[in-house]
Image (cartoon, coloured by chain):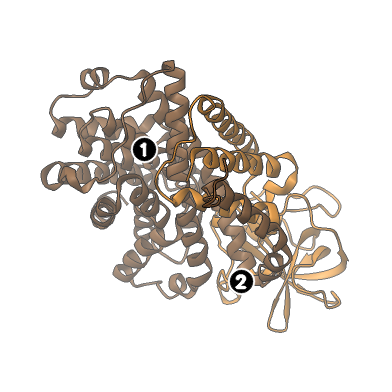
Chain colours: A orange, B brown
Amino acid sequence: MRRDTQHALLVLLGAALLRIAADDTYLRYVRPSHRWLLLAAGAVIVVLAVVGLVRDRAGPPAHEHGHTPWLLLAPVLVIALVAPPALGADAVSRAGAGNPVVQDADVFDPLPPGAPQLPVAEFVQRAVWDTGGSLHGREVVLTGFVVRRGAATELARMTIACCAADARPHRVRLVGDVADPAPDTWLQVRGVLQEGSATSVTGHVPALTVAEATVVPAPPDPYEY
Amino acid sequence: MTTAVGIRPTSMHVFCAVLLVAILARPLLVDALSVPVLQTAATVFVAVCVQALPFLVLGVLLSGAIAAFVSPAVLRRVLPARPEAAVPVAGAAGLVLPGCECASVPVARRLMGQGVPDAVALAFLLAAPAVNPVVLVATAVAFPGEPRMVLARAVASLATACVTGWLWQRFGRAEWIARRAAPPHAGGGRWAVLAETARHDLVSAGGFLVVGAAAAAALSVLVPPEWTEALAGQLVLAVLVMAVLAVVLALCSEADAFVAASLTMLPLLPRLVFLVVGPAVDVKLIALQAGTFGRAFAARFAPLTFAVAVCCAVGAGLVLL
């Protein structure tokens, strides 16, 4: 690949990083704190390419051996032409049958009054571990996407630590009238935990008796952290 | 100037043609990637690229800075003269590079280019992503109530770096590393050397990072979840499968602790193996190392590191956990 082609390729690569960090697209792939890293990396890549272009103007276009730089075009094209969506029902169904249950605590703070909005991961944590019964009889509001497992309808949300490659799903089984939403539909549900439903028999997937389910647009921030 | 023979296509022509075809074929591409399994793989592919590129950029900038500002003489003064003694020093130096494994590959190559013995640079390569403060804090957060996990990870990773370094010093051959860092081009001042070295390293390593990301994405949808679910109660098998999983999943070393923590059906030892093997050898790193140092190197270094990392992790786990 000629050096001028390499420069053009690097400009596109840097621009792709800047483009996904400019709006919420990057949140499909990495956690929010990664944004400034993407902006810095994109800017550095563009600057390196421009410096190369300017310095090469003096001489004839030189050739550097090797074809591997071409591969850098793959992420650029996938980002620019497709920008794949955040992980959804397909990824959840590939992740095994149970919820990941790392015990953070066995006593949790009491919930705020009313029907508080809880992250799905926190709801699962409380349902599995809380010996203080903070969820008992309490209405909560959860937001997630629909996953079908046989006849059951589940509400799921992915938790990521760094990027989508390390995503772990947290799932809640929905009981009651939730209509028949298609997989990957985003729902906001209000309901009450069925006590004793999040055991090792159910793969630590708690059941929620749904009082109300509303279809909502996908949030800009699809993951929990 | 156009001659009677016609225009010989250059890579720039090919580049523009590829872009044009890709844009015209966009509906086909979007269609192909709307299959759920391909969509999941595509998301993981972009995620690994996007997550790793900033660290690769950090690595090539450091590599450029070393080429421009740190002369071989300075490195010789800082490091102990005997490689056997310099290996643990380089391993401990890994503490100060707070990045993922992608950053340390170009830096290690540049250190070799500046006259640091191969074994010493490789010890740095293995230690930097595994024992830096960010990774250890992430491990402590992921395993609340298990501080021994952090200690065991640090000890096992440092041991992996040192043992591999010593083995390479004893048995390694210089000609296995086919691709050496070219001496920085003279002229244009130090900043120009930095920019050109960083640009060159980025172009040559970036393509291999893409290979690794594609492999990790493919394997992430191909490895069935039953692999980990069937392992409860089978310690030896669990250790081996978790070591293999660490290689094929290619997680960032700052994130792998959270995944390991979520595998609660397994005892701590196999999960420690996962944490020690992952930053030392995975498909993304193998691709990156094959591109950076040559295939002959990667074919020897990857199995060596894998074996050493598994042994060190099991040893540290049996003593400390």
Q: Tell me which amino acid carries mark 2.
A: Val
Q: Is residue A14 left or right of residue A181?
A: left
Q: Is circle 2 on the same chain as circle 1? A: yes
On screen, residue B241 above or below A59:
below
Q: Quadrant of residue B75?
A: top left
Q: Give the residue at the far top of this rendering.
A: B189
Instruction: Give how far apart the Cα atoms at labels 2 and 1 are.
Output: 34 Å
Q: Name the residue that disc number 1 marks.
A: B128
Q: Quadrant of residue B21?
A: bottom right
Chain of the residue that carries numbered disc 1 in the rendered image: B
Q: Quadrant of residue A43?
A: top right
Residue displayed at 21% across by 42% down: B165
Residue nearest the observer in this picture, A32 or A61: A61
Residue nearest the observer in this picture, A170 or A163: A163
Q: Is residue B30 left or right of residue B180?
A: right
Residue B265 position within the rendered picture, expressed as x and y whole percent measured from the top left? 46, 67
Q: Give the residue at the far front of this rendering.
A: B4
Chain of the residue that carries numbered disc 2 in the rendered image: B
Residue A83 visible within the image: no
Residue A156 position within the rendered picture, expressed as x and y whole percent measured from the top left? 70, 65
Residue nearest the observer in this picture, B1 or A94: B1
Residue A119 position within the rendered picture, expressed as x and y whole percent measured from the top left? 72, 54
On screen, residue A170 above or below B224:
above
Residue displayed at 22% across by 24% down: B79
Q: Is residue B153 left or right of residue A3?
A: left
Say few, some or many: other residues with alpha carbon within 10 Å of mark 1 (under 14 / 14 to 19 / 20 or more): many
Mark 2 secondary-structure assignment: helix
Q: Tell me which amino acid carries mark 1.
A: Ala
Residue displayed at 50% across by 72% down: B222
Q: Are marks 2 and 1 in contact (CB under 8 Å)?
A: no
Q: Name the residue that disc number 2 marks.
A: B37
| Disc nearer the start of the sequence (2/1) | 2
